[in-house]
Structures are given as structure tokens and as C-alpha cells.
Image (cartoon, helix red, strand yellow):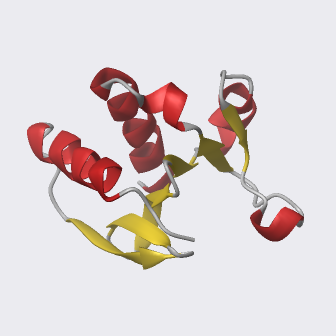
Amino acid sequence: MSYDRGLAERVADVLDRRGTRGVRQKNVFGGRGFLAGKSAFAIVWDDGLIVKCPPAEYQAALGSPHVEPFAPDGEKPMSTWVVVAADAIADDPDLEQWLERGMRAVR
């Protein structure tokens, strides 16, 4: 799976504008992962984003428009991970909210 390099740049820019430190990038699941320490909190995948949710926020996240469980190859969904479609992160404030959710999950 390829990933949207423009979206990866937007993610990096949003994190930089927030002053987020200690984030690194690496290829994950064929996408571009953003990690805090050794834990991925978001992955740019195709033209959307895969985001790790805090367990208490997972069901609410699934209730958001354009969000579905992350189930690679149609297998059982990976708990606490969701796929956020491009429509849900078209604006930087929306993208930032999803990235914040991912960072909360790995803190």
C-alpha cells in the first residue's frame, strides 16, 4: 500500500506547529508511521490516516463520520485502531484533533 506524501507532510507540519517533540517517522504497514518513542500513534495510509485511540475513546471514534475499524486484509479489527478517511481530515484543525487522540493513546 502506498501513502499520500502530501498528507504525511501535513501531519509533520501540524505536529511541528504544535511544538510536539520526540516524534519520529518510519514506514509501518506500507504507510508512513508517526511514533512517540517506540509506539506508533498515527499512520498515513493511502489517502487517509490510521489512528490509535485511547481505549475509552475507541467506540466514540467509531461513531464519527468517515471512520471505521482498522482491519488489515479484512481480518479481525485491531482493537483501538481506526481508519480515518481523507474527508474527515481535509482541514488541519480536524487532522490535529485526530493526531492529539493518537498521542493520548500512547502516553
Q: Is residue 98 above or below residue 104?
A: above
Picture residue at 66% right of the left edge, 22% below the top: 64
Q: Of 29 and 18, which appears nearest the observer?
A: 29
Picture residue at 58% right of the left edge, 45% below the top: 53
Where residue 26 sits: x, y (%)?
A: 35, 77
Query: How many labels, in total?
Result: 0
Picture residue at 52% right of the left edge, 27% below the top: 88
Where residue 15 sits: x, y (%)?
A: 21, 46
For this view, does 102 lie left or right of residue 24?
right
For this view, does 5 lie left or right of residue 86?
left
Q: Of 24 and 29, which appears nearest the observer?
A: 29
Q: Of 35 and 56, which appears nearest the observer?
A: 35
Q: Is residue 15 above or below residue 18?
A: below
Where residue 37 sits: x, y (%)?
A: 32, 72
Q: Of 104 and 10, which appears nearest the observer?
A: 10
For this view, does 103 lie left or right of residue 24?
right
Where residue 107 sits: x, y (%)?
A: 41, 54
If the image is split into quadrants, where does the N terminus sit?
bottom right
